[in-house]
Amino acid sequence: MFKIGDKIKAKIIDIKDGKISLSIKALKENPWKEFENKLKKGDIVSGVVIKFNKHGALVSIKQGVAGLVHNSSFGSEEKLKKTLELGKTYNFQITLFESKDQRMTLVHLDDVAKKEVE
């Protein structure tokens, strides 16, 4: 991304033991702020599955803003991975949204519809 001698803008985030820690990211607007008073529990959003982990699937609704679809909403990790594919876009319902703490949980919209039918 950068090489020695490049001129960049950065923010000093720490000075300790004669070392200076810099951050380029700290100069950018926090992407969660855009949704601070716009999204809430129950809202429907579109998102891309970007990663699987031991807890479930990580879904990005915008670069830098992602939430977790927990395995338990599908019954098992295996069922979640059979339903959701990496790189694909799906509709989700927000079950928790805390922009201040950068936390969001989601359920797959098809899964919500199935539970309502049952």
Image (tube, helix red, strand yellow):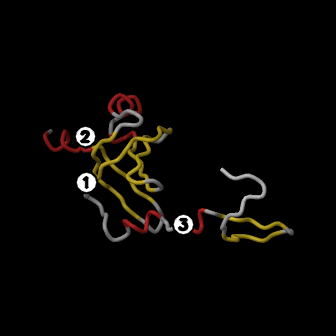
Q: Residues within 10 Å of mark 1 (few under 14, many from 20)?
A: some
Residue drawn at x 30%, y 63% as measured from the top left = 40
Q: Which residue is mark 1?
A: 44
Which of the labelled discs sits on residue 111, or is there none? 2
Of all residues, the one furthest to the right in this rendering is 18
Proximity of marks 2 and 1: CB atoms separated by less than 8 Å? no
Q: CA distance from mark 2 to mark 1?
A: 13 Å
Q: What residue does disc 3 label?
A: 28
Residue situated in front as seen by the camera: 105 or 63: 63
What SS does tag 1 mark?
strand
Q: Tell me the number on the disc at residue 86.
A: none
For residue 113, side relative to residue 19 (left or right) = left
Q: Is residue 23 left or right of residue 30?
A: right
Q: Earlier in the sequence, mark 2 or mark 1?
A: 1
Q: 29 or 77, which is in the foreground?
A: 29
Relative to 14, 77 lies left or right = left
Q: Give the image location of residue 51, x and y in percent.
A: 47, 40
Q: Quadrant of the C terminus?
A: top left
User: Foreground residue, 104 or 13?
Assistant: 13
Picture coordinates of residue 16 (x, y %)?
81, 69
